[in-house]
Amino acid sequence: MDLLSSMKMYVAVVEGGSFAAAANRLDVSRAMVSKQMQKLEEHLGTRLMNRTTRRLSMTETGRAFYERSAQIVADVEEAEQIAGQMTRMPQGVLRVTIPLSYGQHRLAASLGAYTQAYPLVQLDIALSDRKVDLVEEGFDVAIRIGALPQSDLIAKKLGAIHSIACAAPAYLARSGTPLTPADLGNHACLAYSLTGGGADWRFESPDGPVIVPIAGPIKADNGDIIRLAAIGGAGIAFQPGFIVDDDIAAGRLVRVLPGWQSAELGVYAVYPSRKHLSAKVRTFVDFIAAALTA
């Protein structure tokens, strides 16, 4: 019995949820899948799945065998991918999720340049500040900003950013200019709701971090909405430089608390660790990293 082929088929059955789904995925008959699974259980001397007329469910042994088999199958596929890397051109659909404002301000031109460099790849870009589940939602790569939670995903650091406080000249003329972070308690602050609910701002200083509770008339889950509200004079924004740098340079916004900024926020490319790193993922991550460095 070809044990590796049987392991691949078992992984397909578990991930597809049925013999029929595995047969369709592997382009074989349902009967062949059923027969191969029976032989695999006989070879192992244990039951891997409980079968009913409606569903399949893994036994405890079956679940442990699946987890190891899935990793082995992924490793074999990666070895095959690496062996052929030099002769294969990146191609196919590459699904990428990117924070909305970061994609618009920093990556739009690079995305176009990538497709010119690799014309056989079709980018499917989802701009959203929501933290998507890459595996569940079928994404190949995510660009993420800030601290990453513990997970089985692989992350490659692409760069770093800082958030800075700024406001429109009209707002500062009307309400005054804060001189220390503590002064923000007397100001209208425009909160980004996806960072701890927007309840406080955290600044770095030589003596360590300073956390300031803030309040104001607007809270939003998108940095460009905060930026436009600040330009309109609604209050003080605390946003990454890639969102507000051009407005500060043009005078639409004025930096306040110039000696203070946020801690460094890493920018990462994140992708599932269980899948072999395809040519399209590898070239995309390397291309974006080089573009951001430049």
Image (cartoon, grey):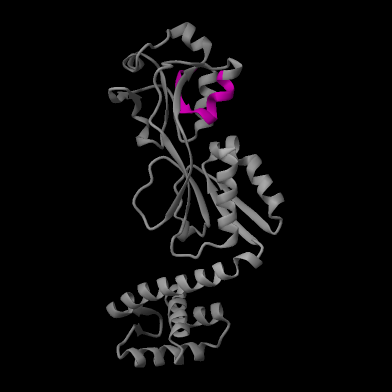
Q: Which residues are magenta?
A: 234-248
Left of 208 or right of it: where is 268? right
Q: Position of residue 106 (x, y in %)?
A: 58, 37
The vertical placement of 32 against 145, above or below, is below
The vertical placement of 47 against 181, above or below, is below
Query: Within the image, what quadrant is residue 217 found in?
Result: top left
Query: Within the image, what quadrant is residue 209 found in?
Result: top left
Q: Position of residue 128 (x, y in %)?
A: 52, 44
| Residue at the image point whose x is 49% and y is 12% from the top | 171
How many numbered discs, if any?
0
Question: Is 281 colored magenta in this rendering?
Answer: no
* Quadrant of the rendering where the N terminus is positioned: bottom left
Closer-to-camera residue (265/96) = 265
Question: Is 238 colored magenta in this rendering?
Answer: yes
Q: Position of residue 244 (x, y in %)?
A: 53, 25
Left of 238 or right of it: where is 91? right
* Quadrant of the rendering where the C terminus is positioned: top right
| Residue at the image point whose x is 33% and y is 79% from the top | 62
Closer-to-camera residue (230/88) = 88
| Residue at the image point whose x is 52% and y is 53% from the top | 141
Closer-to-camera residue (102/277) = 277
Left of 262 or right of it: where is 80? right
Q: Position of residue 32 (x, y in %)?
A: 50, 90
| Residue at the image point whose x is 42% and y is 74% from the top | 72
